[in-house]
Image: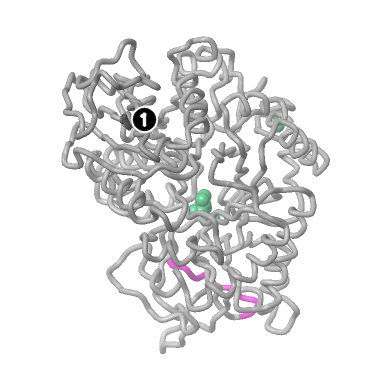
Amino acid sequence: MEQYDFRRMSIYQIWIRSFCDGNGDGIGDLYGVYDKLDYVRSLGVDAIWFSPIYPSPNADFGYDVADYKAIHPDYGTMEQFRKVLERAHALGMKVLLDLVINHTSDQHPWFLESRKGRDNPYSDYYIWRDPILKRRGHRLPNNWSSQFAGPAWEYGAERGQYYLHLFSKNQPDLNMDNPRVREEIRSIMRFWLDMGVDGFREDVITYISKHEKLPNGLPWLPVINGMPYYKDGPNIMRYLGEFRTVAREYGAVQIGEAPMTGVKSALRYVSGENRVLDMIIQFDPMMADCFLTEYLHHAFSLRKLKRAFSRWQYGLAGKAWNALYLENHDHPRVISRYGSQHFWRESGTALCAAYLFQQGCPFVYQGQEIGMTNIKLNSIEQYLDVASKNLYHMFHKNEPQEKRMQRIHVSSRDSARTPVQWSDAPNAGFSTTEPWFYVNQNYTEVNAAAQENDPDSILNFYRRALSLRKSSETLLFGDYREYCSRSAKLYMYERSLEGERVLIVCSFWPFHSRYELPAGYTSDRMELLLGNYPESAVGTLRPYEAQVWRIEKERQD
Ligand code: GLC
Ligand code: CA
């Protein structure tokens, strides 16, 4: 079947547990989603990506799947999912599911069988290795770390072997070299595609093919030392090609999550007619205030952010399509990172203009559109994210407790996982009862209801920005060019197509500043398409001001 034109699409991400509780048990669910579909559509998005909604013991909140062909009872029934799907389609939105196939839950029936012994039908579904025997007892099969800290191996006493887990020990990695495992994946894809699902976001998909011998990684490198032997592995293109064949039968879209991936390796996956993925979720824009992961924090650098943006814009130009995002369930809230608490509204809207008009499909994560910010909990016991907990307990143990908690405050994924703030009602209108996780106490000011009818709100800026992008061929398909790349105060870029030029100028500076127009622009032929202050003037910017200008075509006479 022919693929739909995903390039025009913008995508809203739902992390269901914290989205909206429809049945009053404190946990977000598909009843709540159903009730909010009109709201989601009102943003002007064209698709919803659901983080995992499958049964899961929640060691990693859904990214540990215990049954790929069912709905988590916390979130509702299959019937309710079908209703959501049908209604989303009726509203003109596609539905994408999260395909988490690098690993399963350790409670998945495949794993429960696999761990029993070396000779059952599931024995070879996972990556089991013998311990290396040293004189004094067992040694691990290799020195890889889990990405959530600690060794990547866990002992299974029944088999007397270790299994590989690149994430938590409750997420054993599947053995994708086993053709039966790949057949299972194809069958999972068919199951949902037959139901009418429109595509997948594919979790850490570039990790699924491991180097056959699983060699040791660099001993001194924490957390990602094994990466050269599991990222972009030897059979990755073949395996993705097999999954692509299924997707093609249905015209489905595939978006692959690819941590630590550069432009060059991304192009192998996403360019050309025979691409195996349609877009890559790369991580560069998430590293403007940290080294590799938010836990290794440094001050925000606008220039680092701009370099990341432009590297991908130029790198994929004419060859592939970008996935644009500033937030998801794995990263703290962007206003708290790259914006300003003081200029909350201004910086929230400037950040929106900074990424959303680049070439690619913009993703908006639940709560981003109302400017939700990070939560600060006092003790590590209050945090639920396995990555935050492990990092806290394994690193920087000699530092004072306060410093260690600061590291959690700036990095924890839980900041993006607090209940969505719908109104100033109790529990932020998320639920009629006490929610499963802490509500950010700023909900009395930061909430959707308060912004609904305020024309200047972050919410309505997102709406205007999404509709402007969709209505402009220049913003959709035009060439990208960055100006003033050395400025540490502003980000300026242009999209141009067939003589029409649109200039986006965003201040990241808490004071007034000035800018020069690029060659070819004169202020008398410029029209303001969008701004986050009243009465913008060409050449000057107020704190965190964003301006989107259109310049008329040169007259040919
Ligand atoms: C991806 C998910 C993240 C999860 C990890 C392991 O990075 O986005 O939430 O923890 O994969 O599945
Ligand atoms: Ca519920």
- Percent coordinates x, y for residue 121 in the rendering: 75, 79
Q: Return the residue at label 1.
A: 335
What amino acid is labelled 1 in the image?
Ile
Q: Nearer the viewer, residue 224 or 59?
A: 224
Question: Measuring 71% from the left and 66% from the top, which residue is drawn there?
Answer: 186
Q: Nearer the viewer, residue 162 or 186?
A: 186
Magenta stretch contains residue 551:
no
- Percent coordinates x, y for residue 388 in the rendering: 42, 47
- Percent coordinates x, y for residue 88 in the rendering: 71, 35
Q: Quadrant of residue 191?
A: bottom right
Callout 1 crowding tier (Cα within 10 Å): few <14, some 14–19, many ≥20: many
Establish if 11 lies above or below 342: below
Establish if 204 lies above or below 129: above
Establish if 218 lies above or below 90: below
Quadrant containing the C terminus is top left
Q: Quadrant of residue 351?
A: top left
Q: Of all residues shown, which one is farthest toward the right?
A: 79
Q: In this view, does 404 lie to the left or right of 131?
A: left
- Percent coordinates x, y for residue 83 in the rendering: 79, 36
Q: In this view, does 3 lie to the left or right of 461?
A: right
Q: Which of 247 and 217 is in front in this view?
A: 247
Establish if 450 lies above or below 553: above
Q: In this view, does 357 lie to the left or right of 221?
A: right
Q: Magenta stretch?
A: 151-159
Question: Measuring 29% from the left and 51% from the top, which residue is drawn there?
Answer: 397
